[in-house]
Image (cartoon, grey):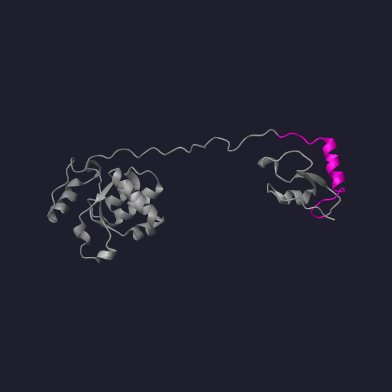
Amino acid sequence: MSFPILWALKAAPVADANERLILIALAEAARSDGTGAVLSRKQVAAVALVDVKTVQRRLGQLRQRGLIAEGDQREVIHLPEQSRPKAYDLLIPYSAFPDIGQVNAEREARGEEPLTPDMRPDLPDAPAKRRRRDLGTVLGPQRQRTGISEALRQFVYERDGYRCVRCGAPDDLTLDHIHPWVLGGVNSEENLRTLCRPCNSSKNATIEGPEVTA
């Protein structure tokens, strides 16, 4: 495994898994000094398992934070212009290379100047993960459930003929909120109906119109 891949996998200050996978995809195509990574956005997306728009957005963020830069575009000049990808350089810090002498020897063989600490300074830490604003909070208003009075209960049962208004069953009857309590429904004769327990259980917290059986 090349050092650029190891750096992208373990040491690069990325913000999340998407950035790491995109960086790994570029590292696979880069030389030992991190330069010359030539991949289309579609190829990067296939490796990182994200869509092309995500690749485009994340490449911009990686450039902005100094992890990558546009490389020597002469690397791709031989490719058709309409489908020509960009060449990128991974800006691996000088201090991160375990064998900078070997890396610079390879650069010298290509006619390039050796890397120096000024050319490849250390990178800032990864940005702090944003905390979800709703994390740890309860969404929606909290309501204290109040009981249904016995008088109201008997009124609804009598109105519905002591039968489930869905299936007509006369046994195991319960009261159901047509507009569910958890969604803001109230204890009123207009919002209550008689359902057998199986029908009430199958309804869950959904809003239905009153279905009165004959």
Q: Nearer the viewer, residue 26 or 140?
A: 140
Q: Is residue 143 above or below residue 106?
A: above
Q: Nearer the viewer, residue 123 or 132?
A: 132
Q: Is residue 147 one of those drawn in magenta? A: yes
Residue 166: name its quadrant.
Answer: bottom right
Magenta span: 145-167
Measured as percent of width and height from the top left, residue 105 is found at 15, 51
Measured as percent of width and height from the top left, residue 8 is found at 32, 48
Measured as percent of width and height from the top left, residue 57 is found at 36, 50
Q: Is residue 12 one of those drawn in magenta? A: no
Q: Which residue reaches farthest front? A: 190
Residue found at x 32% / y 38%: 125
Residue 189: name its quadrant.
Answer: top right
The C terminus, quarter of image: bottom right
* In this rendering, position of residue 161 left or right of residue 129: right
* In this rendering, position of residue 82 left or right of residue 147: left
Q: Which residue reaches farthest bottom? A: 80
Label tally: 0
Residue found at x 33% / y 55%: 25
